[in-house]
Amino acid sequence: MSSITHRRRSCAPTLMAALVVLPLQLHAQGRTNTPPVYPHTGSAPSYDLQPGGQHSSNVSLMGHVPLGGFLHTADIEIEQDLSRPYAYVSKRFHPTGFDVVSVADPKKPKVIYSWRIENSELHQGVGALESRYFKTKGRYYYVQTFQFSQGGPDVDLGAIVFDVTGLPNAALVKEVGRIRDKESLGGFHEHFLYKHSDGRSLLVTTTTGDHANIYDMDKFIAGDPNQGFIGKIPVPDGLVPMKGFPMLGYHDFYMAYDPITHQDKFYGAGLGGWHVYDITHPEAPTLITSVTGVQGVQWGHTLSVDPLGRYAIGETEYEYAPLRMLDLKPKGDGSNFTGNINKVIGAWTATWKNLPHNHEMRWPYVFVSAYEDGLQILNIMDPTNPITVGYFRTYEGPHEGRDAGNPNMGAWGVDVRNADGLIVISDMMTGFWAFKMEGFDGWNGHDWGMPNISSVQDWDKGPEGTPGSKPVT
């Protein structure tokens, strides 16, 4: 395994619900497009960097919008159509909800719509967490997940769905309905929206139980009395929650069509590590393989997978934890591996004393929201030796220390617009950021000899390699 050169972290909802908010002064607050200064104290990455500088020479700031509030900003999602230049930013804690940021001019981003839940001050817990959108039957919808705890209203609320087709006209944004889960109280921490090979638009959510929920969104929009619920994806049997952090199910996941095995796949991060299921028939998920027993990993936080369904990047959440590179098909022939995998093939971290968080793969690049290290970009063409190729630090505060009981600071979420390569970051302290990396003017897997498969969905045609879609090269 290669030596560790970079790293990441995450936010466990049960821990963050008990967060004690401490004062922190950021001189960047109140500025529009002027980035803060964050002195680099770790070892410099490998791409033409200036030690002590805020960013690598190949990453340029496009625009910045301070969104205000200590730890108030959570995840981010950007629409993929250039004709719909909208990014959605979740706003957790009180007042909780979401903002819509227009990047019609990426150099002058601006908030064009804000929504906050009614009686926000009465709600307990972290509130709004993850942002995702989907398109069906010519209309665009936004799904905002929530986690509210007992002692206030909406403890069974998992998500609210909005029709956002009418943007940029804020008056045309309408709530469609609310998804509630009375079986597993505490809401949905994360979710993923997936265009299944059978044509359905599926919402898969985490729960506080030992499973993920699956919803058919066309049924939900049509007013299905079961909210479009069609099934569950369990964690494998025999896994035991870690002491002091009784996670029963999943924290996060990724879904994609596997063009080699011709299966829709669920890649879940949660209890024990990371798990892969065949969800070609989503009402009856079938376990393919698990990555458990990895040294230092008791639970998985996040997982991203390459377009061929082989190499993955897994994150877990503790002080000094690196991103781990995984081979999900170690036989190398593209076929499914049905045993247990307990080894990693590489690792990466931005600064040894920090922790990377969420990430988006656009092979061979991985874009990481690395908490205190901000935006980090690595190349995993050789997954055993990931290389940093760019960065931009969005957080200027001190390192607090995750295992000292302090909250995570800095960059939470990241997304990439494939059409033009615009990179967006949500920072818990400093708000919304937009960047471009030199030479990265968009992404299509075909340009790299790969299927055009990423977290971005083709809502009109479905996954590549299926009937009606573009052929796999």
Image: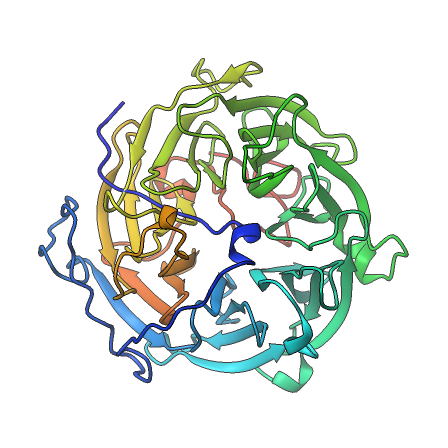
Is residue 253 visible to us here?
yes
134 vs 97, nearest the viewer: 97
Residue 37 vertical placement versus 246 (above, below): below
Is residue 167 visible to us here?
no
Q: In the image, what residue occupies the spot 38% across and 35% down?
A: 449
Residue 422 vertical placement versus 118 (above, below): above
243 vs 263, nearest the viewer: 243
Q: In the image, what residue occupies the spot 25% across and 60% down?
A: 392
Residue 324 image point, x, y percent: 37, 33
106 vs 441, nearest the viewer: 106
Residue 465, by quadrant, is top right
Side (left or right) of 402 relative to 182: left
Residue 217 image point, x, y percent: 75, 55
Residue 416 vertical placement versus 337 (above, below): below
Residue 51 image point, x, y percent: 9, 55
Residue 436, by quadrant, is bottom left
Model colouring = rainbow
41 vs 245, nearest the viewer: 245
Q: In the image, what residue occupies the spot 44% across and 30% down?
A: 297
Residue 230 vertical placement versus 330 (above, below): below
Side (left or right) of 199 relative to 390: right
Residue 249 image point, x, y percent: 64, 38
Task: Specify the farthest residue to the right.
Answer: 225
